Image (cartoon, rainbow, N blue to C red):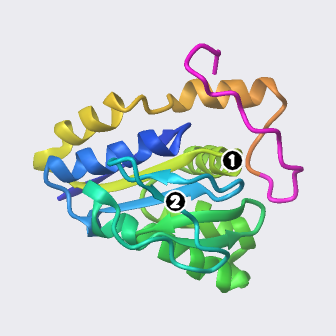
Amino acid sequence: MTTTLTALYDTREAALGAVRDLKVVGLEDTDMSLIASGDPAPAMPQGDGDVLVEAGAGAAVGAGVGGTGGLLAGLGLITIPGIGPVLAAGWLATAAAGAVAGAAVGGAAGGLIGALVADGVGEDDAHLYAEAVRRGGTLVIARVPNLRLEAARTVLDARRAVDPATRRAAYRDEGWTGFDPDAPRPAPRDTRPDRPV
């Protein structure tokens, strides 16, 4: 049996570190997905001082990705209505892109939110994660064999995953009630460690 774990990060670096660490505890590339805001698209560090630079709309992103290997070598840029461009890899990216292509399922809600809900994420959390990606966050989703569940949770938390309840409360304090693909894009959050979230 497997359990789906989802972790939100304010920085791509933290998310990439989580992916690398999940591989160390035994997860395979096929067990993981990554969705990162693609707007703006800063360089993504590989770990050895090199960077992975976005190749352009619709293009694959880079080949070798240091210690992260296959999953992130397959990062591509897709556009999800209401969220905008995202860098995505893994099964969830495929599901979200497929749902968006078949717009009959409801555009953005049918895309990322629908893919998350279909994979066992609660609808409230799916709305939160879609909003967070829209605001510049990076989402790591892992299907974890139950024998590795505690190790995977430790890895995700060690990389300073965002607490969903805290972030949801912060968004609601701003008047947010749920993901709205037609809402204006908010200014990016200041996520420096010395600033409140």
Q: Nearer the viewer, residue 91 or 14?
A: 14
Lateral position of residue 77 relative to residue 26, left or right: right
Task: Please give the count of numbered marks on the rendered protein.
Answer: 2
Q: Quadrant of residue 63?
A: bottom left
Residue 190 seen in the figure: yes
Q: Specify the amino acid type for callout 2.
A: Val
At a point 34% along the width and 43% down the height, the residue shown is 17
Instruction: Give the Cα distance between marks 2 and 1.
Output: 15 Å
- Relative vertical location of residue 81 with respect to residue 97 in this rendering, above or below: above
Look at the image and tell me in which quarter the C terminus lies.
Answer: top right
Residue 7 seen in the figure: no
Provide the secondary structure element on which disc 1 rests.
Answer: helix
Magenta stretch contains residue 12: no
Magenta stretch contains residue 195: yes
Q: Specify the amino acid type for callout 1.
A: Glu
Q: x, y percentage for residue 173? A: 78, 23
At a point 39% along the width and 64% down the height, the residue shown is 72
Disc 1 target residue: 131
Disc 2 target residue: 117
Q: Nearer the viewer, mark 2 or mark 1?
A: 1
Q: Nearer the viewer, residue 1 or 60?
A: 60
Q: Nearer the viewer, residue 121 or 44?
A: 44
Q: Are marks 2 and 1 in contact (CB under 8 Å)?
A: no
Which numbered marker is on residue 185?
none
Q: Nearer the viewer, residue 188 or 120?
A: 188
Report the predominant secondary structure element of the magenta stretch.
loop
Span highlighted in magenta in the image:
180-197
